[in-house]
Image (cartoon, rainbow, N blue to C red):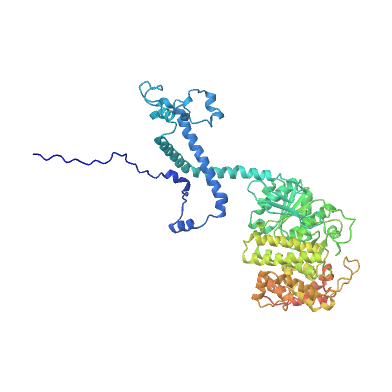
Amino acid sequence: MAPSAQPTSSQPNTPSKRKKKPDPFLDLANTPIPSAVSSPDEAQKDFDRSESTIKKVILTPLLFTSFIISLFFVQRRDRAYRYNEHPPLTTSWWLRFSPSQWLNPEPYQDPDDSTWHKASAGTADGGDGSISGIDGQVEMTRRNGKNQWFTRKKHRKMAKLHFTDAFELQGKTIVAIETVNNDVVVPLAMSQSAQTGSLAECGVLKPRGRMAQEVVKLAFDGQDHPLISHGIPFAQACARHVEQNFKASRVYILASGTLARTTNVVRTLQQALDGKVVGVRYGMTPHTLWSECIEVTKDAKEVDVDLIVTLGGGSLIDAAKIVSLALANNATDFPSILNLTNNRDPSVPRPDLASPTVPIVSIPTSLSGGEYSDHAGGTNDETHHKHGFGHAGAPLGPKLVILDPELVKTTPQRFWLSSGVRAIDHCVETICSPFCTPAAARCASSGLRQLVSGLLRSKADPDDTEARLQCQLGVVDAMAGCKAGAPLGASHGIGHQLGPLGVGHGETSCILLPAVCAFNLGHAAEGTAGTEKGQEHSVEPLIDIPAKQHIVLNVLWGVDIIAQLFDKHGLRQGETPLADCLDVIFRALGLPRRLADFGIGGEEQLNKLAENSLQDRWCVTSAVPLKSKEMVREILDACGPKTG
C-alpha cells in the first residue's frame, strides 16, 4: 500500500516586499561636484581645506548660473523636439513662434490641448478598449487623483537625463559667459563709469561693474589744488578726468624715457586718451635743463596744447611747471626764461608776469613730491646754477595728481627708494625748522612714519602694493608739512647745487641729510634763522636743535619695523644721535652715502659747490643758517671721500 502523501506546510500568501533601491538622484543636491585634481594627495588636501573667499564669492555664483543656463538650453532643446512630434491642436505660425508660448506647459502636460494622449494604440476615445493616453497614464491619473509609482520613476529618470546633459554643457556655457562679460559687459561698464560724477562734486567715485573704487579728494585742507586720485588704473583715471573735468582735446605728454623704453605704459596712456594726444616728449635730463624746457615750450606752442600730462619723476614735473609758465609769457630763449625766475624769493608778487593758463595733470612714478609744490627748479645749462620758479599769486602746481601703486612697480628700485629719501628729507627738515608750527610737525611726523616703514617694506618686497601706496600717501603728508609755512634747510639748499653735478634728487638727500643733522647738532648754539632783508622768514627765533631732533627720533623709534632695524645695528634709544639713525636707514635701503660714489671731491669742485650753495634761499633758512663758504665746506667734508 502506497504511503499516503504527507501534507506540505505552505507559507502564508503574503506579498513580498521589494527592497527599495537607493535613488542616486535624491542625493544629487548633497553630492559635491567633482573637480579635476592633479594627484590623489592634492585631492585629499583640497577636500580638507575650507573653501576660499574667491571660490565663495566668484566661483560658486558662476557655477550655479552656468548650470541653470545649461539646464534651460537642454530643456528648450527637448521641448522643441517634443513640440515637433506632438504639436498642439490649436496651432498656427504666429502662435508657434510667439514669445507668449515659450513658457507654456510642455505639450504633453496639457491633456486638454495636446495630441500626446493619441500616441497610444487605439483611438483617443478608447474605441478598442484601451485606456486613452500613453499606458493609460492620462486616464489613470484622473481616476486615482495622483500619479502612479511608475510615473514618478519616469520623471526622475527624465530629470537625471536633463541634469546629465546640463553638466556636459556647463563648460561651454561658462566660456560663453566669460566671453560676453569680457567683450561686452566690462567695456560697457568702463564707458559708463567714465561718465560718473563731476570732480568738483565727488569725494568718492563708484565705478560701475566689477571695477575698483576711485578715491578723489583734495590733497591739502584749505587749498583748491591739487586733487589726488587713487584706486583705479592711472590710464583710466587720466582719460576720465581729461574728458569730463578738463574738457581737453590737445594733450601734450612729458613721459619718462626709461618707462618708454622698458614698458608699454606710455602707449597705454596714449591709447586711453583716444586721439587727444598732440605731442609726446620722451625723457628729460635730471634737474631740468633750461634748453630742454625751451624745446618743449616751442613744440607745445606750435600744436596749441590745452593740457600737459606728466608721466614720470620730479624732473618732468618741474619741466611741466616751467613750460606752462613759459607758454603764458612767450618765453622761448635763455634771457626770457631767466626773467621768469623768482630771484630766491617766491613770496614777492610778479605783476609783470602772466599766470599759467595750461593746466597740468601729474602721474608720478617717484616720491620726490614735486607734484604737490607750486614752485619749480630748473638748471641753467651755461652756469650749472639751479634757479627757482614760481611767485605769489601764480601757482604752478598740477591741478590733479593720479597715484597708482601698480604703475610705480615699473620704477627702478634705486630710484624709487632714493626719491622716498627725498620725501623723508622734507619731513625731517620741516620738523627741525625754527619756523615749524604744531600743525606742520603733525603732518611731517605722519609722513615720516609712513615713508620710512613703507620704504623698508618696499625694499624687502618690491611687489608689496600696499607699502607703495603707503609711501605715496606719506608724500602727501610730508608736503602738507612743507606747505604749512616752514621753510626747508641746508640739505635741500646744497642739494639743489649738487644735482647739476650728476647726483639724482633723492641721492642728494641720502648724502647730505645725515651730515646736515650732525652739523646742526654740533652748532646748536648758532641756531637762529635767516635775517636777510626781504626774506619771508626774517625773524630770529631761538631754536632748541637737540629737542627738535629728539622729536624726529621719537617718531622713528615709535615704529616697530624701524625700531627693529635700529636694535639690529646696536643703536640705543635716547643715546644714538639722529644723524647715525638716518645713516642706518639709508644704508639698509642700499643707497649711496658719499660724494665719492659720484666722483665728486676735488678742492676746486667743492669750493665752487659751496659758493653756489650760499645763493640758495634754503641755506639761509636752515636750523643753523649757512653764512660762509667754510660752513658749507664743513658739511661737504663730512660727506667725505670715503665710500660704502
Task: Locate residue 592 relative to residue 114 in the image: left or right.
Answer: right
Residue drawn at (59%, 44%) of the image = 181
Q: Residue at x 76, y 45 (%)?
A: 247
Image coordinates of residue 464 in percent, x first then y, are: 63, 61
Whether residue 500 is visible here, answered yes or no, is no
Identify the residue at horizontal 77%, vertical 73% (top origin): 549
> Quarter-wise, where is residue 324 in the image?
bottom right
Q: Position of residue 224 (x, y in %)?
A: 81, 54
Residue 275 placement: quadrant = top right
Q: Please identify the residue farthest to the right as the structure is shown.
A: 533
**Relative to the observer, which residue lies in front, 191 or 104?**
104
Q: Taking the image as drawn, is residue 117 in sight?
A: yes
Percent coordinates x, y for residue 280 in the rendering: 72, 52
Q: In this rendering, would 462 be left or right of 6?
A: right
In the image, 489 versus 14, the foreground residue is: 14
Residue drawn at x 52%, y 41% is 68
**Between residues 252 and 525, which one lies in front from this camera angle?**
525
Left or right of 461 in this view: 600: right
Q: Quadrant of the N terminus?
A: top left
Q: Residue furthest left?
A: 1
Which image quarter is the C terminus in?
A: bottom right
| Residue 379 sits in quarter | bottom right
Estimate the x, y position of residue 547 in percent, counting from the top left. Answer: 79, 74
Q: How many marks?
A: 0
Image vertical order of residue 515 relative to residue 218, above or below:
below
